[in-house]
């Protein structure tokens, strides 16, 4: 399905849905015109579950703007009557490379719409990504395993190390001792302090290049990461703003551009 083929422009006052398909979950938003009404998350869907949504409440929202990093999940919406699959070609930024995730591109576009540019977006999802733009030009970024994934991979790839992710990720108001005396704390220390140091390094470098520019944080682990930053590096946390809806703002921007012709 090619985006926007044989589609009529949608009046800006009409209700519509935005869907961002991530590696772990589906992220939904309901709009009335330009106004965000509500957001929610679901697990990835089976074909039958997707059809059930189409047959029930989704049909009340005739237009669906969709961005996906999981092709198998995208295919579930091919037969939805007014589904518009947003690709990099619809994102009005310069310097986008073919393998750039559509989620990163839309989040940066949404950030520019929200706070202007230059801007740095940190996405604390399954992967932890840094993506920066100045004007409408992509400056670049970085990708590493996300907070939860680092705990999970370490457990999966070793024979004797315990699974400590859930216990240590629940408490956002304290950190383990840096020089730990048990294996669980040693794992948590290695992952958390290294990750927080990496965030500081990237934010510091960005702010050296673009002094005073905003830094926005989103993603499923953003609250956890922000909580750890407030404990470990309050000065850094104070330069970062939580903004969970950046991809939805980006989808809204693409929709506006399409309506203008």
Image (cartoon, rainbow, N blue to C red):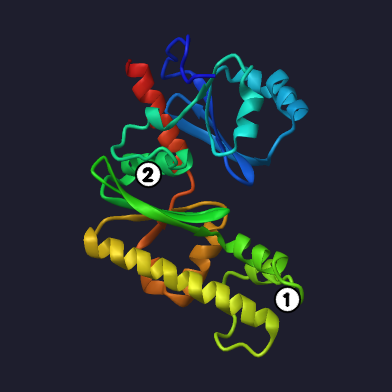
Q: Earlier in the sequence, mark 2 or mark 1?
A: 2
Q: Which residue is drawn at 47% across and 13% down?
A: 5
Image coordinates for residue 250, horizontal then vertical, percent: 41, 36
**Secondary structure of residue under mark 2:** helix
Q: Distance between the residues labelled 2 and 1?
A: 38 Å
> Is the residue 206 above or below the residue 219 in the image?
below
Q: Residue 95 falls in which quadrant of the image?
A: top left
- Using the image, tell me which numbered label, if any, was put on residue 108: 2
Left-right relation of 185 to 13 = right
Left-right relation of 94 to 184 = left
> Is the residue 105 above or below the residue 75 in the image?
below
Quadrant showing the C terminus = top left
Image coordinates for residue 15, horizontal then vertical, percent: 52, 21
**Residue 47 visible in rendering:** yes
Q: Which residue is drawn at 41% across and 19% down?
A: 12
> Is the residue 32 above or below the residue 39 in the image?
above
Q: Which residue bears the numbered disc 1?
A: 161
Could you tell me if the residues under marks 2 and 1 are in contact, i.e. CB atoms within 8 Å?
Answer: no
Q: In this orientation, which residue lies closer to the viewer: 157 or 27?
A: 157
**Residue 211 visible in rendering:** no
Q: Which residue is drawn at 69% across and 67% down?
A: 157
Count of marks placed on residues:
2
Q: Residue at x 41, y 37 (%)?
A: 98
Q: Residue 233 falls in which quadrant of the image?
A: bottom left
């Amino acid at each position: 399905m090619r985006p926007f083929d044989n589609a009529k422009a949608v009046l800006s006052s009409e209700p519509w849905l935005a869907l961002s398909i991530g590696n772990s979950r589906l992220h939904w938003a309901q709009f009335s015109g330009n106004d965000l009404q509500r957001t929610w998350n679901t697990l990835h869907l089976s074909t039958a579950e997707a059809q059930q949504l189409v047959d029930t409440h989704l049909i009340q929202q005739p237009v669906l703007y969709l961005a996906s990093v999981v092709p198998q999940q995208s295919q579930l919406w091919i037969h939805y009557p007014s589904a518009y699959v947003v690709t990099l070609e619809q994102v009005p930024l310069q310097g986008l490379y073919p393998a750039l995730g559509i989620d990163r591109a839309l989040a940066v576009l949404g950030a520019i719409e929200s706070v202007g540019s230059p801007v740095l977006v940190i996405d604390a999802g399954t992967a932890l990504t840094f993506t920066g733009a100045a004007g409408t030009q992509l400056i670049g970024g970085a990708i590493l395993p996300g907070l939860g994934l680092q705990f999970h991979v370490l457990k999966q790839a070793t024979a004797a190390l315990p699974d400590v992710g859930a216990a240590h990720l629940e408490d956002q108001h304290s950190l383990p001792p840096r020089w730990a005396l048990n294996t669980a704390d040693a794992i948590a220390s290695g992952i958390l302090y290294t990750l927080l140091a990496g965030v500081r390094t990237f934010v510091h470098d960005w702010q050296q290049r673009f002094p005073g520019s905003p830094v926005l944080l989103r993603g499923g682990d953003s609250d956890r990461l922000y909580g750890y930053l407030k404990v470990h590096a309050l000065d850094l946390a104070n330069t970062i703003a939580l903004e969970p809806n950046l991809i939805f703002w980006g989808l809204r921007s693409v929709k506006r551009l399409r309506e203008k012709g």
